[in-house]
Image (tube, rainbow, N blue to C red):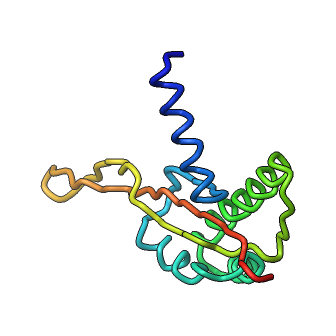
Amino acid sequence: MSTKSRERAERRRTERQAIGPQATQRSARQSPYKMRLVIDEIRGKSVNEALAYLAFSKKHAARQIEKTLRSAVANAEHSSRENGTPLDVDALYVKRAVVNEGPKLKRFTPAAMGRATPIQKRTSHVEIVVGEKEGR
């Protein structure tokens, strides 16, 4: 590994630590619009409140987001154990929650008079960052 790539890897590692524990789910088979409806509800809430909301939500996107949120909490626990810093899981909150558009699956369906109509099956990238509330 060259020195430039080592420096780049170290810079990425420090940037990740500055952001906080995070989890990303890529190419979830749900449209970003539908995912954003759910993610907007949990942004800024405590992790326990967010998980309770997602557990009782009827939306399909809630299951995908719940998995990602649980992964972010597990990553926070792991990083605190690795660094030897204390972590109160009940003090965690959803610091940043973003849904971006992933690659589209392009398909065709038959149409009238021998034509073909394009269908775009949209996918989403979900990114959740958790942080510990100060003053607890």
Q: Is residue 52 left or right of residue 7?
A: right
Taking depth in this image into account, of 120 and 135 the one nearest to the observer is 135
Please say if 103 is above or below 70: above
Residue 115 at x, y = what percent? 15, 51
- The answer to which image quadrant residue 66 occupies is bottom right
Taking depth in this image into account, of 41 and 18 the one nearest to the observer is 18
Residue 86 at x, y = what percent? 86, 62
Residue 16 at x, y = what percent? 58, 50
Indicate the quadrant containing the C terminus: top left, top right, bottom left or bottom right.
bottom right
Indicate the quadrant containing the N terminus: top left, top right, bottom left or bottom right.
top right
- The answer to which image quadrant residue 71 occupies is bottom right
Please say if 86 is above or below 92: above
Taking depth in this image into account, of 33 and 88 the one nearest to the observer is 88
Q: Is residue 114 left or right of residue 131?
A: left
Residue 9 at x, y = what percent? 54, 33
Q: Residue at the top extreme? A: 1
The residue positioned 61% from the left and 63% from the top of the image is 129
Figure disc tally: 0
The residue positioned 47% from the left and 74% from the top of the image is 36
The residue positioned 57% from the left and 53% from the top of the image is 25
- The answer to which image quadrant residue 134 occupies is bottom right
Q: Is residue 25 left or right of residue 90?
A: left
